[in-house]
Amino acid sequence: MAATIIDGKEFAGRVRAQVARHVDRLKSDHDITPGLAVVLVGTDPASDVYVRSKGKMTREVGMKSVEHRLDAATSEAELLNLIETLNAAHDIHGILVQLPLPRHINEDLVINAIDPAKDVDGFHISNVGMLSTGQKAMVPCTPLGCLMMLRDHHGSLSGMNAVVIGRSNIVGKPMAQLLLGDSCTVTIAHSRTKDLADVVRRADIVIAAVGRPEMVPGDWIKPGATVIDVGINRLDAPERGAGKTRLVGDVDYESCAAVAGAITPVPGGVGPMTIACLLANTVTACCRANGLSEPEGLTA
Ligand code: GUN
């Protein structure tokens, strides 16, 4: 049977609509407008596209969007000063510093300077600790989006075998914590894992987050398993014309879709969920800061 395609674009639209309804309510009932500040240092073209897109979608759901674009030569001290100002700003509920930062700036220092309550990326060491100890945390956006899609597709994830391929701080590790929180039996696989094929074949849920194009073939997938592809890799596609490219994930879509029970496509799977979850986290942070009830279904 053909796999169900989990449509992240459509799902993200629903999440944004829910966020927008909550923003309306915060404005009308409490005279509060959630605000998100995004900080970009330098002119990396990919980061510039992300930041633009974040700003546009923030405004579309009715929130306040503030962008700080700083010169690549900005010092660490200047960036830390800006973060201190944003931490103290009452109209800013979420702060995101776009990564990567220029090499002369210590990323960990900057991330941990953000007020954990405003850390909508969920990268602050306090939020990492809160998540791993099962306390109320700000949760990284990409894993949160994956969790939402899994819960929507399966209902309960309790007792399922989940394999996360990739051990990054942004996706792999928090994803494993979230799955553990939903009572999955979790394996984190990585570049040194022995017999990765065998490990993946035992999984009811496969999360591929390694950043290697099409590395998971269909014959690694247990029949009926759910495959969540976090990879976004751009490959040359001369067959489409000179200079053309195409986006592929970390799984070989055609062969995996032939075996899986459900699968996320690339593009249109996990990608659109990441910004939707950033908006969801900003509303959540705003509600928590004001002692108000959080939107249902938008948190872990
Ligand atoms: N750069 C690439 N992905 C991310 C992300 O999720 N958050 C931040 N802050 N920077 C990124």
Image (spheres, rainbow, N blue to C red):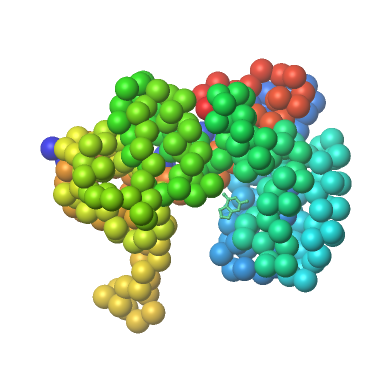
Asked if residue 129 can be seen in this view, the reply is: yes
| Left or right relative to 259: residue 267 | right
Q: Position of residue 86 (x, y in %)?
A: 82, 45
Q: Residue furthest left?
A: 1
Q: Position of residue 18 (x, y in %)?
A: 55, 29
Q: Nearer the viewer, residue 74 or 108?
A: 108
Residue drawn at the location 37% of the way across and 55% of the way down: 191
Q: Position of residue 75 (x, y in %)?
A: 81, 65
Q: Nearer the viewer, residue 282 or 109?
A: 109
Residue drawn at the location 68% of the way across and 56% of the way down: 107
Q: Residue 3: which quarter of the image?
A: top left
Q: Position of residue 229 (x, y in %)?
A: 36, 48
Can you say whether 21 is above or below 104 in the image?
above
| Left or right relative to 296: residue 206 | left
Asked if residue 62 can be seen in this view, the reply is: no
Q: Residue 76: which quarter of the image?
A: bottom right
Quadrant occupied by the N terminus: top left
Can you say whether 103 is above or below 265 in the image?
below
| Left or right relative to 180: residue 83 | right
